Structures are given as structure tokens and as C-alpha cells.
């Protein structure tokens, strides 16, 4: 680790260990636990070191040196009592970026501060808000965060300052009614979330007149989480809020914060509808880190689906690492991709620790969404107090309580975006000691590509956030909610909600009888019903499904409605707080799944089918033998069965299911290829289905490299003869109604995306295809047929066509494509 850019060898001796940082020492412990030798030269200077490793699970490591801070004087406008309060809490002076951002907000300029994790972004909005409170005893402020835990943590930090007459108050789904009433009547700084703003405050804005009339600041924390469909809803929700504020005569200053967002000023402007200035020069000190990229070994004694080689699971590696690090006394978070994975990882670490010291096993727990509020709070408190030494968590703690300064973070599976990876890794690192961050690759194309191409992760900027407030599936419900709050005027249409697209959606709503059109605007016809209650801003459309214990009627937790057919189908294994259950019945209409306690020695994976039809072509390129298109598509999918798998991945049984079809109107990108060109390139007709199928799987796995999304946010289909294109075709589509911008992003960067896809397939060490390249965990056809070599040829044909002279782009569909109305 360190010592230059070449490959390194040799085992560090005792004198090296004395010079090594905490992160390198912990990495040695992890390597020892895996039975591998440390193959690096020691870092003996302050500069960063980047090292590749030839053998063993450690593929790459880099030492990131600490960064000194740049403190500045308190701005003159900050009241003395506010300075003293921060001084008592340990803040003797602001960092440069804190003072710069706070000064802009104090002057009334909308601002986004985009600096590193744990860089003290809170001070950027705390200073101007508290200064304004001191100047104007009637001023109010609103703080919005994507999670209740983060809002609660910020509220605790503000309370700790002990300043008089700030009167902060929570306002979320867990807030009792009497506390909500107190917040409405007396609260000056409310800590809430978009869901509460949407469902409660804005629909009842008449009751909040005094608060909204005096509203001076709106804080939007962790703004990079507002992307895709959720982000599009929040963008329109903020416009609704600012429109209501204008009605009461206020124009609050917006302060946004994010540790990880590309082009922050442009993104914040899209999100809020206002011109926003960015502060990006981080003046805070940064802890040194050792970042390691880890690829679990192949398990030669096992064979996966269709005989594919199998790697040791990322969750199993994370369990062992978590146990090793806890034994070492390192406070550690292990981020795991799924709720079930977090439970299994914590259980695995507890079992390993119980063999060493039963007392240590009690200091490891799981934390995830779906827990009841009281369970979440108890775990958060134990973590903050240090009673828990190791926690396996979903991304629920990525933005949760203030737990920066841990010794280590293990990321079990790339979290989908570079932004999330750096957000999670930022939880590790103390000012005076270095930390360890390990990315453990899953058996997945994206993960495998990153550990073998570290420059795509460690040296690349974070992705841009994608959102589309003009998505009609988002715009329609939001306009209905806006009209129920205040009649929507022509001015609102043109200046607030996007102009012509909004007008077209309003006309459809009038034609459908949802709204009424009058000379002064568009009206919601009912004075009793509130449409916000039926609009899910999280974008699922199906809400939540409650997991209920059949014998007792006790609600264990919830799962997202759209994922319920795949995760809560009859026969599925459901884990909660380390206890396993079997799903007996799923009622999607009622939003309830009945479960019973069980302890099976197998897990379940759902299988589904999908069909894609072109509804409207929005753009296409004619490239000779290849055509590339982007447009609106209709996807019909159905969960048709599930597999029971042993812990090692062996398929024990395939069980059919009879669940209803689900229809999705969304957007997609697709390419179709002349069959003769494929034959000429070396893919005969009998191999075309498998080659296309493999190329589709790998492309879905690699799209998150270029857009902030997860492979579960997108879907795809391939066919040797699509009835509308008339040729071999590969589709990749958004998994959200109306589209979330992911396929559109893929269309914009198609050449780079498919190049990375081809490299990932070609660079995989397997012979005929495996989960690290072309197999998909959600394939409804059981990953049959798949032709790894054929996929490389297919992608080569497409990339050769894309590298030809720039074609003419048109918005009209090609002659062979049928245009279908929705």
C-alpha cells in the first residue's frame, strides 16, 4: 500500500507496522482473516499511494492522506450568543466553506453547499437561521431531510446549543398529535421531511398561515437523494411550497446541502426551480483513509446456475470482516444492499464472534428500514453511545444519525452509485487517526468491473442526479394536489410548473373530470377530500405492504408495494430482527402479507417474465446495420415462480406462482441489428437469442456506472425478432411509471456505456458466463439462453456502428416501427 504506482510485493515487518496508519493495520487484520498475505509496500509519506495487487482477494488499494482544515473568523453578522453557543459545543471557528455558504444565505441568496461527508455543512444553514431568529423574534424556518433519523439527529444537535427562544420541533409521521399542535402554534424551526410536507402541512396550509407568512429559510438536506421519480415529486413539492408561501407574502431563502452531487448548482436549480449558487471548496480537515477493493474468491467446489462458477458471497465476506474488525476493537459499519442481507450479515458476524467472546456477539446488530420507530430509535441510541461496536445496515444509515468518525466501513456490494459509495465511506475516519474502507464486490457485472477498473470509482467524479419534473405521471398528481391547495393560475403554469407540458396535463385532468377549468384557473372540485393522501411521492404507485404475523396479528414491518410480488410472494422467506418467517398469503389490494414463524435452511429468489412494446419513438439514429432508438414503451411483467436455494446457492426447487400481471408505461432505449450483420460477424441465427440476452443483462448491470440508479430501477428485454422493429432487438427501460430519466441518460452516453459493458464481459475470467458478467439475479428465464462470446460480438457490431460518422437524428419514427397510443 503506497510506495508508488507499480505492483508491490513483500510482507511488512515490525518497523513498518509501527509507521502504518490505523487503516493499513485494520486491512492487515482483514487480510489475515481471509488467510491472505499483505502484498504492498508501506506508505511512508503524506502523499496518496495507489497500488494494484496481483493475487488474492485484494485487487487494489489506495492510501488517501489527511487534509488540513482552513479555519476563518466568525462573520461579523453572527450574534455573540450564537458564537458562544457553538464554542461551548466545540466549534471555535468556522471552516472557510461554512463561512462562505452562510454569508450567501444570510444575504438572501439561494445556495447549495456540496462538500465532503462530515465537513460541517449543518453550520452553513444554522448560522443564518439563528442570526435571523436573533434579529426577528417572529421569523421561522423549515428543515427537510429524506429520513426521519437525520432530521432527529439535526434536532438533537440544535437542542444541544442551548440557545433561547429557538423553539425547534419535530414534525414527522411519528410525532403525536398534541406535539404537532404545539409545533404549529409555537414552533419556530420545524424539522420534517417531504412526505409530511406533502401529506399534512401543505394540504392544511390554512392552519399554518402564521408559520408560512414568517418563513425565512427552507433547508433541503442531502439533496442528492432527490433523484429519479422521488426527486421529480420533491421538485414539484418544493414548487408547491414556494407557491403557497408567496400566497402568504413570504419568499424564503433556500439552503441545500449534499456531500455527493455532480454539478451542484445546476442540479439544485432543477430541483427548486430557482437560480442557486454552489459552494464546493471544502475547507474542513479530512481524515486519512485506506480504501481497498476486494473480490471474493471463487469456490471451486460449487457450481451456480447452468454450471457457472460461484464466488464467495459478498455478505459472507462482510460478516467475516465485521467480526474481525470488532475483535480488533474497531467501530465498524457494514453496508449491505438489502434488508435481508443486513440481517444475514449481522447474524453471521454474531455467530463468528460467539466462538471468540460471547460478549462481543452482543455488540453487533442489524439496522434497516422497515423496523418500527421504537426499534430504530433504540438501535440509533446504542450506536451513538458506543454500546454497539459493529452494525450491518442498509443505506438507512447512509444518511442517518451523526456517526462519522468510525474506524472502518465495509461496503458489501457497490451501492449503485459513486455518490452513495463516498457517502457511506465518509462514515469512517477521525481527525487524528486514519480509517479503513473496503468495497467487497458482489458476483455482479458492475462490481466486478469496478474492482478491475479502479479508475472508474476512485478517480472519477460522482454521477449527475437525474430527475424529470415534467414526467406526466408525476406532474399530473402534483398538479391535482396544487389545485386542491390553491387554484392553479395561468401564471403558475408558465412560471412555476413548467409551461406547455403542464398545460397539456391540466387539460387532460379537466377532460377526465378530475379538475375544473374556470376563467381564473384550474380548481379541485371537492372541499372535503384531499388528494395528497393518495399520491405516493416515493414513486412506487402501490404504497407499502404490511408484513403481519398471522397467529398474533402483530405488524413486523413493511415492504415496498412494487417489490412485494418478488419479495413477499407466497412461499418467500422474510427476515425481521434476525427471525425468519415464511409468507403464507399476499394481498396486493389490501396491502397485507401474512407470515408465520419458521426456520428454513434455504432462501428464495423470485422469477419473472416481461414483454416490451414500443408506444412512441422520440428519437432514433439510423446507423446502417444498427438502429438506436429512445422513446416511450409499455412493459408487461409477471412474477411466475421462485427458486428455493441452499445457502451455497444450489437450486433445490423451482415453484410456480400465479400472481397478476403488472403493466408499466415508461421510457426505454433500444437498439436493433440487421441479422445478416450478426451472421457476418460470427453469430449464426441459433446463437443470436443467447448473445442478445447476455448483452442485455450486462448492459443493465453497467448502466449505474453512468446514471444514479440501481439495476433494480431498470429492466430490459431481448428478442431475436421483435414484431415492431422486425429485427434482433435489445431494450433497456426505466422501472418507474413515465420514466425516471435513466434510459434517457443511457441513450445520451450509449457508446461509453456499451464500451464498459463489452469490457466487463470480455474481462471476466469465467468461460461461458457467470453472475459477474452476463447472468442476472432477476432473470425470468433462469439465465437461459446466454452466450457470453456472442454478446461481445453483438456489442462490437453496435459500437462499430456508433463510431461511424455522426448520423442524422430525427424525432420521427422509422418506417418499420408501429406507433401505438397508450
Image (cartoon, helix red, strand yellow):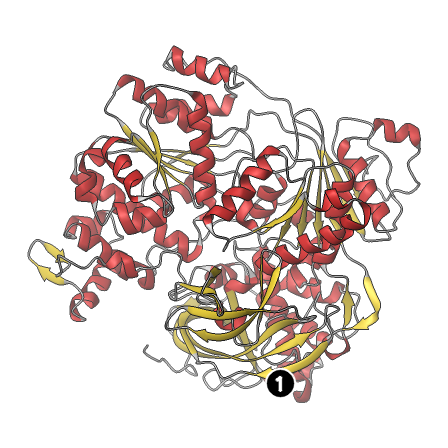
Give 618 or 554, whichever is nearer the viewer. Answer: 554
Name the residue tied to disc 1. 676
Q: Residue at x 19, y 34 (%)?
A: 210
Write down the quadrant of residue 104 in the picture.
Answer: top left
Residue 425 x/y as whole percent? 63, 41
Instruction: Let me know if residue 665 appears in the view.
Output: yes
Q: Is residue 685 left or right of residue 239?
A: right
- Of all residues, the one furthest to the left in this rendering is 519
Write down the quadrant of residue 434 in the picture.
Answer: top right
Question: In which quadrant will I find the N terminus?
Answer: top right
Q: Is residue 738 left or right of residue 89?
A: left
Give 458 or 372, whichever is nearer the viewer. Answer: 372
In the image, residue 117 above or below residue 584: above
Residue 111 x/y as whole percent? 39, 32
Q: Residue at x 86, y 44 (%)?
A: 7
Residue 176 x/y as whole percent? 33, 43
Q: Residue at x 49, y 25 (%)?
A: 97
Q: Is residue 461 left or right of residue 616?
A: right
- Of all residues, the one furthest to the front in this rendering is 552
Instruction: Let me know if residue 624 appears in the view.
Output: no
Residue 22 x/y as whole percent? 76, 32
Give 379 or 656, whichever is nearer the viewer. Answer: 379
Amino acid at each position: 500500500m503506497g510506495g508508488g504506482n507499480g505492483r508491490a510485493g513483500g510482507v511488512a515487518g515490525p518497523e513498518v507496522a509501527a509507521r502504518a496508519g490505523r487503516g493499513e493495520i485494520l486491512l492487515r487484520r482483514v487480510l489475515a482473516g481471509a488467510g491472505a498475505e499483505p502484498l504492498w509496500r508501506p506508505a511512508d509519506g503524506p502523499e496518496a499511494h495507489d497500488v494494484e495487487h496481483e493475487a488474492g482477494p485484494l485487487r487494489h488499494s489506495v492510501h488517501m492522506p489527511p487534509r488540513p482544515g482552513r479555519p476563518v473568523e466568525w462573520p461579523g453578522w453572527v450574534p455573540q450568543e450564537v458564537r458562544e453557543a457553538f464554542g461551548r459545543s466545540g466549534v471555535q471557528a468556522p471552516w472557510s466553506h461554512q463561512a462562505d455558504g452562510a454569508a450567501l444565505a444570510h444575504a438572501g441568496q439561494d445556495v447549495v453547499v456540496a462538500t465532503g461527508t462530515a465537513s460541517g455543512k449543518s453550520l452553513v444553514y444554522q448560522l443564518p437561521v439563528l442570526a435571523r431568529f436573533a434579529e426577528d423574534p417572529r421569523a421561522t424556518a423549515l428543515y427537510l431531510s429524506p429520513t426521519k433519523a437525520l432530521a432527529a439527529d439535526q434536532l438533537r444537535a440544535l437542542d444541544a446549543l442551548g440557545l433561547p427562544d429557538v423553539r425547534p420541533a419535530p414534525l414527522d409521521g411519528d410525532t403525536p398529535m398534541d406535539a404537532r399542535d404545539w409545533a404549529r402554534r409555537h414552533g419556530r424551526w420545524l424539522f420534517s421531511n417531504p412526505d409530511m410536507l406533502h401529506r399534512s402541512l401543505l394540504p392544511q396550509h390554512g392552519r399554518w398561515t402564521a408559520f408560512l407568512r414568517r418563513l425565512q429559510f427552507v433547508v433541503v438536506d442531502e439533496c442528492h437523494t432527490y433523484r429519479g421519480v422521488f426527486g421529480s415529486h420533491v421538485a414539484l413539492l418544493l414548487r408547491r411550497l414556494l407557491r403557497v408561501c408567496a400566497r402568504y407574502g413570504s419568499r424564503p431563502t433556500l439552503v441545500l446541502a449534499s456531500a455527493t452531487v455532480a454539478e451542484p448548482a445546476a442540479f439544485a436549480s432543477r430541483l427548486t426551480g430557482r437560480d442557486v449558487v454552489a459552494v464546493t471548496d471544502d475547507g474542513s480537515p479530512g481524515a486519512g483513509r485506506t480504501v481497498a477493493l476486494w473480490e471474493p474468491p471463487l469456490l471451486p467446489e460449487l457450481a451456480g446456475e447452468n454450471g457457472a462458477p460461484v464466488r464467495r458471497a459478498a455478505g459472507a465476506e462482510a460478516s467475516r470482516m465485521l467480526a474481525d474488525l470488532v475483535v480488533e476493537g474497531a467501530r465498524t459499519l457494514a453496508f449491505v444492499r438489502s434488508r435481508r442481507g443486513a440481517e444475514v450479515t449481522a447474524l453471521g458476524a454474531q455467530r463468528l464472534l460467539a466462538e471468540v467472546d460471547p460478549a462481543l456477539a452482543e455488540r453487533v446488530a442489524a439496522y434497516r428500514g422497515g423496523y418500527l420507530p421504537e426499534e430504530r430509535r433504540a438501535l440509533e441510541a446504542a450506536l451513538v453511545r458506543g454500546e454497539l461496536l459493529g452494525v450491518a445496515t442498509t443505506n438507512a444509515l447512509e444518511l442517518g444519525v451523526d456517526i462519522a468518525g468510525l474506524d472502518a466501513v465495509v461496503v458489501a456490494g457497490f451501492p449503485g452509485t459513486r455518490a452513495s459509495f463516498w457517502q457511506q465511506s465518509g462514515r469512517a475516519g477521525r481527525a487524528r487517526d486514519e480509517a479503513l474502507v473496503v468495497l467487497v464486490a458482489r458476483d455482479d457485472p458492475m462490481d466486478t468491473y469496478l474492482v478491475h477498473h479502479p479508475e472508474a470509482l476512485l478517480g472519477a467524479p460522482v454521477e449527475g442526479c437525474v430527475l424529470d419534473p415534467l414526467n406526466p405521471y408525476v406532474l399530473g398528481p402534483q398538479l391535482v394536489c396544487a389545485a386542491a391547495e390553491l387554484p392553479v393560475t395561468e401564471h403558475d403554469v408558465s412560471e412555476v410548473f413548467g409551461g406547455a407540458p403542464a398545460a397539456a396535463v391540466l387539460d387532460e385532468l379537466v377532460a377526465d373530470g378530475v379538475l375544473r377549468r374556470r376563467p381564473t384557473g384550474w380548481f379541485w372540485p371537492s372541499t372535503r377530500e384531499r388528494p395528497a393522501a393518495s399520491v405516493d411521492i416515493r414513486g412506487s404507485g402501490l404504497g407499502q405492504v404490511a408484513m403481519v404475523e398471522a397467529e398474533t396479528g402483530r405488524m413486523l414491518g413493511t415492504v415496498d408495494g412494487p417489490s412485494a410480488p418478488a419479495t413477499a410472494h407466497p412461499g418467500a422467506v422474510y427476515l425481521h430482527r434476525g427471525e425468519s418467517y415464511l409468507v403464507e398469503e399476499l394481498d396486493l389490494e389490501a396491502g397485507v402479507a401474512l407470515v408465520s414463524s419458521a426456520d428454513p435452511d434455504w432462501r428464495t429468489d423470485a422469477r419473472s417474465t416481461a414483454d416490451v412494446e414500443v408506444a412512441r419513438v422520440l428519437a432514433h439514429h439510423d446507423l446502417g446495420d444498427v438502429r438506436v432508438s429512445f422513446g416511450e414503451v409499455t412493459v408487461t411483467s409477471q412474477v411466475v415462480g421462485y427458486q428455493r436455494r441452499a445457502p451455497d446457492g444450489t437450486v433445490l426447487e423451482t415453484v410456480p406462482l400465479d400472481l397478476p400481471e403488472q403493466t408499466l408505461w415508461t421510457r426505454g432505449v433500444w437498439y436493433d441489428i440487421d441479422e445478416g450483420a450478426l451472421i457476418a460477424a460470427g453469430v449464426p441465427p441459433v446463437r443470436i437469442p443467447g448473445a442478445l440476452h447476455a448483452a442485455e443483462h450486462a448492459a443493465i448491470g453497467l448502466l449505474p456506472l453512468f446514471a444514479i440508479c440501481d439495476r433494480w430501477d431498470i429492466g430490459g428485454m431481448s428478442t431475436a425478432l421483435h414484431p415492431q422493429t422486425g429485427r434482433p432487438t435489445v431494450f433497456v427501460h426505466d422501472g418507474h411509471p413515465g420514466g425516471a430519466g435513466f434510459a434517457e441518460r443511457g441513450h445520451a452516453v450509449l457508446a461509453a456505456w456499451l464500451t464498459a459493458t463489452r469490457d466487463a464481459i470480455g474481462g471476466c475470467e469465467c468461460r461461458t458466463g457467470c453472475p459477474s458478467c452476463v447472468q442476472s439475479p432477476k432473470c425470468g428465464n433462469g439465465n437461459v439462453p446466454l452466450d457470453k462470446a456472442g454478446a461481445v460480438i453483438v456489442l462490437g457490431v453496435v459500437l462499430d456502428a456508433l463510431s461511424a460518422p455522426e448520423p442524422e437524428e430525427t424525432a420521427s419514427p422509422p418506417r418499420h416501427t408501429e406507433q401505438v397510443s397508450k
